[in-house]
Image (spheres, grey):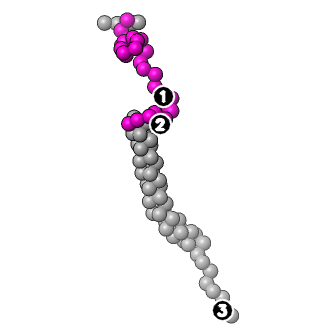
Amino acid sequence: MPAGPRSRAIWRTPAATSISPPARSTRGGFEDAGLDGYRARMGFQHAMRAAHTSVEGALVRILPCIDAFRERIDPPEAPRPG
């Protein structure tokens, strides 16, 4: 059956019937009250903590490599006698 104007889903709500889906927040639901807003905020917080931990771990592994590379290119000068 070809798609046409009548093939769209009709969303039924207790107050009205409309062709378009229910309005969603443009901010990702962070300001929503209740469980939906809580899940959005906690999901974002979890993702940010995981990303921070990942970047921190990468830096801890990379910095010694950079120091070793720097010493190979520009070795520290030996102390000069007296």
In the rendered image of this protein, does residue 55 appear above or below residue 10?
Answer: below
Query: Which badge, 2 or 1, is on the more N-terminal residue?
Result: 1
- What residue span does the magenta drawing correspond to? 6-35
Query: Which badge, 3 or 1, is on the more N-terminal residue?
Result: 1
Q: Are marks 3 and 2 in contact (CB under 8 Å)?
A: no
In the rendered image of this protein, does residue 51 appear above or below residue 20?
Answer: below
Secondary structure at badge 3 equals loop
Return the residue at label 1.
Answer: 25
Q: Position of residue 74 (x, y in %)?
A: 60, 72
Secondary structure at badge 1 equals loop
Q: Residue at coordinates 44% horizontally, 51% vertically from top-left?
A: 49
Q: Position of residue 24 (x, y in %)?
A: 46, 25
The quadrant of the picture occupied by the N terminus is: top left
Indicate the quadrant where residue 79 lies: bottom right
Q: Position of residue 2 (x, y in %)?
A: 34, 7
- The residue at the far bottom in this view is 82
Tell me, for residue 70, which label it has, or none: none
Three-letter code for the amino acid on which mark 3 is drawn: Pro
Q: CA distance from mark 2 to mark 1?
A: 9 Å
Three-letter code for the amino acid on which mark 2 is drawn: Phe
Q: Are marks 2 and 1 in contact (CB under 8 Å)?
A: yes
Q: Nearer the viewer, residue 23 or 2?
A: 23
Instruction: Answer whether residue 47 is visible to the viewer in this image.
Output: no
How crowded pointer 3 is (Cα within 10 Å; few <14, some 14-19, many 20+) is rated as: few
In the rendered image of this protein, does residue 14 appear above or below residue 59?
Answer: above
Return the residue at label 2.
Answer: 30
Marks 3, 2: nearer the viewer? 2
Return the residue at label 3.
Answer: 81
Q: Nearer the viewer, residue 61 or 69?
A: 61
